[in-house]
Image (tube, rainbow, N blue to C red):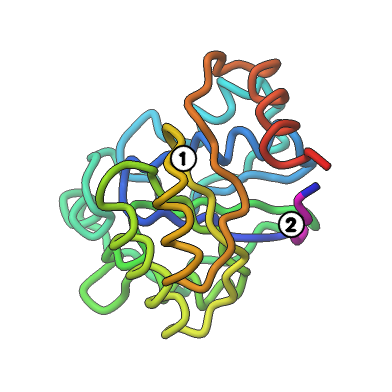
Amino acid sequence: MLALPPRFFVAGTDTGVGKSAVCAILMAGLGAVYWKPVQSGLPGDTAWVRQVTGLPPGRFAPETYCLGHPLSPHQAAALEGVEIDLERFSLPPSEQLMVEGAGGVMTPLNPRHIFTDLMRRLGLPVLVVARSSLGTINHTLLTLEQLRRCQLEILGVVVNGPKNAASEQAIEHYGKARVLAAVEPLEQLDPPGLRAAFERYFNAP
């Protein structure tokens, strides 16, 4: 069984690597509250995770910034005439909390700050989600290096996609980080399927 801390941050090596799918699996098995502090593009990941998990509204904290354009947050905010302000972010008052990032860890938030600045402000340990396809080793090693440079605690890596044992071994060897789970494509994106995936990938003895 994988032991995760009660509150942690889920970061991706890039956009589209499966952060929200991994969050949905974890939400199906943990008693956590889900929080997406910055959303670019609607209806957004909070709505999607809530839909596929079937969990009640009380398990979801509202976004601090909810931007309509599916772009990097700094671009989406500029189009709406706002600037993302780090001082506006504070952790929801939940003892069990899962925070999902946007894009990769160096995604810009405003002209001065990138996502690792927000992650440092929140001060949570980080679970990295990486894709399994070609190119993931480079993206994952760069992500791990940046997190260490920012003195952020790394819980480990979850690889998402078709099984790729060679990439998993390379990430562990070169990145000096444990691959905690290798989540293969799910046949069912619904509450029973997500609960089964949690038991298989995160709760197996």
Which SS does the magenta portion mostly show? loop
Residue 51 screen position, x and y as percent: 56, 21
Residue at 56% x, 14% y: name it.
188
Residue 31 higher or lower than 95, as above or below: above
Q: Secondary structure at mark 2?
A: loop
Residue 32 screen position, x and y as percent: 74, 45
Instruction: Give the residue type that dot 2 points to.
Output: Leu
Q: Secondary structure at mark 1?
A: strand
Instruction: Give the residue type that dot 1 points to.
Output: Asn
- Residue marked by disc 2: 4
Figure quadrant of the C terminus: top right
Q: Which mark is residue 120?
A: none
Q: Quadrant of residue 147?
A: bottom left
- Mark closer to the chain start, 1 or 2: 2
Q: Nearer the viewer, residue 9 or 137?
A: 137
Residue at 57% x, 70% y: name it.
154
Residue 96 screen position, x and y as percent: 77, 53
Q: Residues within 10 Å of mark 2 (few under 14, many from 20)?
A: few
* Magenta region, residue range: 2-6
Q: Is residue 30 visible?
A: yes
Q: Which mark is residue 160?
A: 1
Left or right of 163 in this view: 52: right
Residue at 48% x, 57% y: name it.
169
Q: Nearer the viewer, residue 110 or 168?
A: 168
Residue 135 drawn in magenta: no
Residue 100 screen position, x and y as percent: 51, 51
Label 1 or label 2, whichever lies nearer to me, is: 1
Residue 3 drawn in magenta: yes
Q: Nearer the viewer, residue 80 or 191?
A: 191
